[in-house]
Image (tube, rainbow, N blue to C red):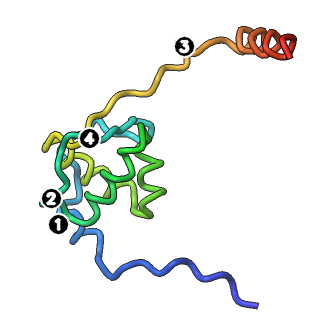
Amino acid sequence: MSPPRRRERGLVRPYVVTDGRAHPTRNTLDLVTLVMAMNDRPLSGLSPEKKRLMELCRGGALSVAEVAGHLELSVSVVKVLLSDLIDSGHITTRAPVPRAQLPQAQLLQEVLDGLRARL
């Protein structure tokens, strides 16, 4: 029995997708940086990969790692594409919420217990 075939990818190489660039114009992007599409920006003139990225991010904030996974592109390629879209004003980013600002587990448990008691 042969292993399941992975979905065939296009023949476009990463250096073609990134216009030959290996490094993004911004060094602030990491795997957990959240990216959001600016919905007022037109998609005309964007490459097919950038259009797909914009359409994906219009649904809400996603991390760089999530974008790469959904688009089935390497993180390095996604960072170059995101940098271009940030530079053109199509994408905005923000850092994820630090763990120190998240509610403590005990508080969450108390809220859950209170909700269950109301049922």
Which quadrant: the C terminus?
A: top right
Q: Which residue is painted at 26% across and 58% down in the image? A: 50
- What residue is shown with label 3? 100
Q: Amino acid at mark 3?
A: Ala
Instruction: Compare residues 87 and 110 and report the one nearer the observer.
Output: 110
- How far apart marks 1 and 4 lie (CA) works out to 28 Å
Instruction: Report the disc number at residue 20.
Output: 1
Q: How far apart are the alpha carbons under marks 3 and 2?
A: 41 Å
Q: Quadrant of the N terminus?
A: bottom right
Give the mark, 1 or 3, whose residue is nearer the N terminus: 1
Do the numbered discs 3 and 2 sit on residues whose CB atoms are within 8 Å? no
Q: Which residue is mark 4?
A: 39
Horizontal side of residue 114 vs 24, given as left or right: right
Point out the tag, 1 or 2, that comes first from the N-terminus: 1
Q: Amino acid at mark 4?
A: Asn
Q: Quadrant of residue 13?
A: bottom left
